[in-house]
Amino acid sequence: MVKRTLYFMFFLFASIVYSQEIPPIEIFTPQDYGAEDQNWAITQSENNFIYVANNLGLLEYNGATWQLYKSPNNDILRSVRSAGNKVYSGGYMDFGYWMKDQYGKLIYQSLSTNREFKIKEDEQFWGIIDIDGFVLFQSFETIYIYDITNDNFKLIHSDDRINKIFKVNESIYFQKANIGLFKIVNGKEQLISSVLELKDNEIINIYAVDDGLLLQTKENGIYKYNEQLVKKWDTSANKILSEVSVYSAKRLSDGSFILGTISNGIIHLSSSGDVIARIDQSFGLSNNTVLSIEEDSYGNVWLGLDNGINVLNLSSPFEVYVDKQGILGTIYCSAKNNGYLYLGTNQGLFYKRFDADSKFKFIPSTEGQVWVLTVVDGILLCGHDSGTFTVGNDNTADFLSFEKGTWTIKPISSDMLLQGTYKGLSILEKKNGSWKYRNKIDGFNISSRYVELSNNNDILVSHEYKGVYRILTDSNYRQVSSYEKLNVSQGAKSGLLKYNGNVFYIYEDGFYKYDIGTQGFQKDSLLSAAFPEQDYLSGKLVIDSHKNRLWGFTKDRVILIEPGELSSLPDISSIPISSEIRKSKPGYENILHITKDEYLIGSTEGYVIINLDKLKEEPKEIVLNGIEYSSRHDNFTQLSLSEASQPIELNYKRNSLKFSYSITDFDKMSLSEYQYRLKGIYDNWSKWSTNSSVVFENLPHGEYQLEVRGRTSGVITKNRIEYSFIIQKPWYLKPLAIMAYIVLVLMLISLIQVLNKRHYKRQKQKLIENKERELELEQLESQKQIIQFKNENLQMDIENKNRELGTATMNLVKRNELLNDIKVELTKAKTIDDTKNVIRLINRNLNNTSDWKLFEEAFNNVDKDFMRRVKSLHPAITPNDLRLCAYLRLNLSSKEIAPLLNISHKSVEVKRYRLRKKMGLDHEQSLTDYILEL
């Protein structure tokens, strides 16, 4: 209870919010324009660029970017004035002019150096005026009159301070402190009034009126001068003007006045002197001290502040109210009733009278989220997070329904209303002239933000994340008979609304119309085209009963749908105001008709008022500000902006170009966008973009034409930028190089042919040599095979010889053994005489040397050099010893050798012993091994 009481007291005292709708204000901080805080003078050039005298130098603004040109001596600039194609400026001990060079950059030329006069020490120039071929530079001590044609000066000196210089119609006035008001006639000063009011009051500006002059003073308001008579101008603003200190002032093209003050912002006076508005930091200015004022060609008022630059869009069709204190919060809905304007926000319900100076007040008991405001028979119903309120004529709120969360309220009949709530549907009924809560419709408990009646007892409910439901109730709207989900896709930030007897459903896929016959939704291609998917923001639709209009909202526009006057098709138009500028909460957009063609759009910071009658489609001009080129690793270099009869040609290495352009649109509520195409490589237009420059990197050689166009508030610029250029072919692609390539190719072909012939000749020779080598190798291989075959045959012969030798040896052994056996047997005969002849014959055979010769021949065939090696090594060996060596060479044992020598085994051993001695073998050395190793 204590918390609720404190909350109520906070709103009672804190939420009485002063309401003043003001024109949009574009704010530029020192960080935005890249210079210091103080801005002493502002002017506009012929091409609509803005120039500002800043502490750091001269600022240039082309509608897209700021450029700072520092003064030659890095001094403060106090004054600036555009005249013709020059921008004149004055500062500390110097004045001169700036002109653009061929690259679009400003170059400064001093007018005070090398003259017959000399600038005084610490002299500063605070005012510049141009008139009839002359430019006047004013310091506190001197007025320098510059003749542009003859390039010479006339000087008006003063011992008294010259406060300011003024141009009124085609006359020049200035004030000397403590003396009076002067006029320059034929290049000389002329005192026109020295009354006390003009001596004691510093004059800030002078305006012409039908019957004289109006003199704006610094501290004492405005005086009227007429034929030496000076008196206070009788206006309702006198009291206010007496309380402020005016530092700068300007009469606007509509006859009204803007006064810039010290510490109190600006005061806007009508032509008759009545206060139209007072705007200071609490209403949107970035600083309360206004050093300079200038009206541009579009009706915007530029303010040079003590800290920053502001642009007041006085001619804008928009007015804004910004809730600086955050008391109101985000506006979700609005309504007007009984001369009051009501705003439903996330912090409660607020109201004020339509009077411009009235204040918003909080309605007690409504703290919290307000979802909907509906006026029924002159009674305001408020759908709230806590339930439903009725708001009486005394602006007090009474609970009508305690059912939580009233999303929407729709009429069923003159005495019955349908509510969509957090938990379904409920009914309000009118009894005895008052609305009462009757019942909840049982059987449907889904949150019902969007509710429409398609027919009696036939209700459509849209839920963003669940889809669209068709609900049938009993005749008294107390019970749901049935409900079904319709076959249409659901989507975030979708919407449902009944307009001109038709129910429409909208989500990012398009605009759908409900068909009662098929009980389904059909896509409306005409209305869907007004809400393209890429631009879709919200399905929230608002009916304007004032002119039977339907409002919709996309990312970049506000859509206006009206019944067609000459056909059944609706008329669709749009207002190019983006969601970033509207600042409405997506899905909860709201718009309210106020008066005539004025509409209020709620936002997260307050609200915006649109005057449809002031909306103008005036195409602006797009300007090319700079061209730069570079190679891959170099910095950008400027190109001339001067028009040439032929396209400029660039070296193939300098094939990266940057183009900068702008539209001089200074309206905060409009958006400048650009589109380009580069014919020769990109023939289609690019997407719209807010970037005011484009870079083409590494362009191939060829001819190109850049085209750039822009749009502001959806209106295409009245001109296009067209710039043609050529990227030269690289030297290696030029005709001479190509001819050289052809010659080189021909020479190369010839060389290749010669080399090929040589190569093929070498290859042929090499093949022949290889073939010959192969043949030789084949012959060698054949010879090798033949030799191998011969060797094999010889080996076979040797083996055969060995076999023969072995056979012969064995035959000899066996024959001798046989003969010995026979001899033994014969010796056993009884009569020797009978056997002597046989024995003699046998002996002859045993001692027959022919067997040895046959053996020796066979042995030499097998081992030719053995006998010779033995004889050469041991000359003392006898033939019998050679015979024993041969048998030992055959690895025969003593037992096997004995029959061959026809001696006993023991005799063989004796022979072996004697042979060892002849050969000189050691006792340990084997005779057989020695002979085998020879």
Image (cartoon, rainbow, N blue to C red):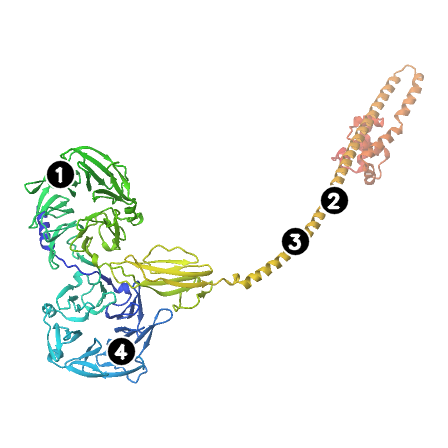
Is tag 3's residue or tag 4's residue first in the polypeptide sequence? 4
Classify mark 4: residues with Cα within 10 Å, few (<14), some (14-19) or many (20+): few
Q: Is residue 622 above or below residue 760?
A: below
Residue 267 seen from this side: yes
How far apart marks 1 and 3 lie (CA) works out to 102 Å
Give the percent coordinates (x, y) of residue 72: 32, 74
> Would you name the residue on which mark 4 appears?
132
**Residue lying farthest left?**
432
Q: Which residue is mark 3?
A: 756
Amino acid found under the numbered disc labelled 2: Glu
Q: Amino acid at mark 1?
A: Ile
Residue 72's place in the image compared with 684, above or below, is: below
Discs 3, 4 touching: Cβ within 8 Å: no
Q: Nearer the viewer, mark 1 or mark 2?
A: 1
Q: Quadrant of residue 834?
A: top right
Q: Earlier in the sequence, mark 1 or mark 3?
A: 1
Residue 776 marker: 2
Name the side, left or right, on which 479 lies relative to 800. left
- Residue 126 falls in image quadrant: bottom left
Q: Which residue is mark 1?
A: 427
Tell me if mark 3 has few (under 14), some (14-19) or many (20+) residues whose alpha carbon lies within 10 angstroms of its own. few
